[in-house]
Image (spheres, helix red, strand yellow):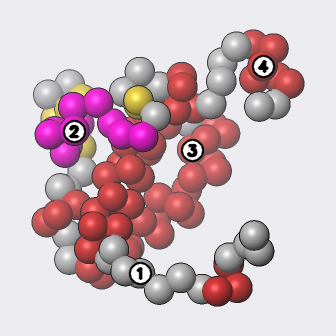
Amino acid sequence: MTASAHRSGDGSPEQRMPEWDGDHVHHPTTVLSETDGELIGVDPAELGDDDLIRELQSLHRTRLDTLRHAADSALANHLRRTAELETEYLARHPGREVDPHRLRGV
């Protein structure tokens, strides 16, 4: 934890977001969040593989900007959507290929 986060007591974005509970989003049976009665995002299970990858790439591309500059509600939505899409990807590819160069020596 950085000194500034420790000093202010804010913690990580996940700890500050009321919708986030560590490893999963509250209400796991609700895939889509509601904001002012509107659903946000397409159910990841309904996305084709190419669309799922495209959505993940978009989220990862905008991650730092969202973390640094977005409102808390936008960051919470970003965290929720990332968790949904990554969970779907892992469900579809449980035996995904792991690059041996990405492994740390133990």
Q: Which residue is mark 2?
A: 28
* C-alpha span from label 4 to label 2: 30 Å
Tell me if mark 4 has few (under 14), some (14-19) or many (20+) residues whose alpha carbon lies within 10 angstroms of its own: few
Viewer-proximal residue, 31 or 41?
31
- Among numbered discs 1 and 4, the one appearing first in the sequence: 4
At 64% from the left and 86% from the top, the residue drawn is 100
For the N terminus, the image quarter is top right
- Indicate whether 15 appears above or below 70: above
Q: Position of residue 71 (x, y in %)?
A: 52, 29
Bounds of the magenta segment: 23-33
Where disc 1 sits, the SS reads: loop
Please, what is the three-letter code of the amino acid marked with disc 2? Pro
Please, what is the three-letter code of the amino acid marked with disc 3? Thr
* C-alpha span from label 1 to label 4: 37 Å
Q: Main secondary structure of the magenta part?
A: loop
Q: Position of residue 24 (x, y in %)?
A: 36, 40
Q: Position of residue 57 (x, y in %)?
A: 47, 69
Q: Which residue is mark 4?
A: 6
Q: Position of residue 88 (x, y in %)?
A: 28, 63
* C-alpha span from label 4 to label 3: 21 Å
Q: Which residue is mark 3?
A: 66
Look at the image and say whether residue 31 sits in the magenta stretch: yes
Where disc 3 sits, the SS reads: helix
Q: Which residue is mark 1?
A: 96
- Among numbered discs 4 and 3, the one appearing first in the sequence: 4
Viewer-proximal residue, 22 or 56?
22
- Among numbered discs 2 and 3, the one appearing first in the sequence: 2
For the C terminus, the image quarter is bottom right
Tell me if mark 1 has few (under 14), some (14-19) or many (20+) residues whose alpha carbon lies within 10 angstroms of its own: few
Note whether residue 52 is visible: no
